[in-house]
Image (cartoon, rainbow, N blue to C red):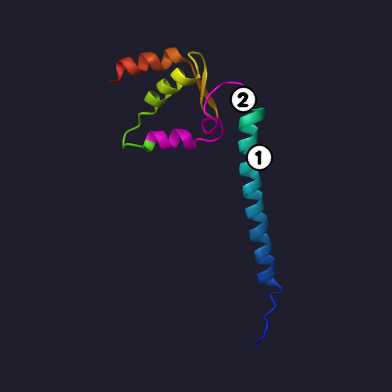
């Protein structure tokens, strides 16, 4: 059986793809670590997944067919406290905002 060596264009293409993939993964890891530990809102309590990414909000917005994330935020205020709460990586919410919204949207 003959062994085929990959040299030239094919090898450089795989190298470029590998570097691109490594850069993308490193960028995602850096962003998650930044959001959790170095972001100005890092001290605000809330779910760690919500602090790291938008996946928490996206899941709860799409779950059930209607966007009722504000109801989940009201539950999180009961768990994490009545003051500021980190609802996703770039935003914190206070309890009064969601209490008034919940009353106007049954």
Look at mark 2 in the image and give the residue it sits on.
Answer: 42
Q: Residue furthest front?
A: 79
Residue 69 falls in which quadrant of the image?
top left
User: What is the total number of numbered labels drawn onto the structure image?
Assistant: 2
Q: Is residue 54 above or below residue 101?
A: below
* C-beta proximity under 8 Å, tags 1 and 2: no
Q: Residues within 10 Å of mark 2 (few under 14, many from 20)?
A: some
Q: Is residue 94 above or below residue 31?
A: above
Quadrant holding the N terminus: bottom right
Query: 41 or 8, which lies in front?
Result: 41
Can you give x and y, in whole percent of width and height, for residue 20 in the image? 64, 54
Quadrant holding the C terminus: top left
What span is in magenta? Answer: 41-61
Query: 94 or 10, which lies in front?
Result: 94
C-alpha gap between disc 1 and disc 2: 14 Å
Which residue corresponds to the image point at 63% horizontal and 27% vertical from the top-left? 39
- Left or right of 103: which side holds 53? right
Q: Is residue 74 above or below residue 47?
A: above
SS class of the residue under badge 2? loop
Can you give x and y, in whole percent of width and height, for residue 25 in the image? 62, 48
Which residue corresponds to the image point at 71% horizontal and 73% vertical from the top-left? 8
Which residue corresponds to the image point at 64% horizontal and 44% vertical from the top-left? 27
Q: Is residue 48 magenta?
A: yes
Residue 5 falls in which quadrant of the image?
bottom right
Residue 30, numbered circle: 1
Can you give x and y, in whole percent of width and height, for residue 11 in the image? 69, 69
């Amino acid at each position: 059986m003959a062994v085929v060596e990959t040299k030239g264009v094919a090898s450089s293409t795989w190298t470029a793809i590998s570097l691109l993939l490594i850069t993308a993964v490193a960028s995602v890891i850096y962003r998650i670590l930044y959001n959790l530990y170095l972001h100005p809102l890092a001290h605000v309590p809330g779910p760690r997944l919500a602090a790291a990414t938008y996946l928490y909000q996206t899941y709860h917005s799409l779950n059930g067919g209607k966007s009722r994330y504000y109801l989940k935020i009201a539950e999180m205020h009961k768990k994490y406290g009545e003051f500021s709460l980190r609802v996703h990586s770039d935003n914190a919410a206070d309890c009064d905002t969601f209490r008034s919204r919940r009353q106007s949207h049954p």
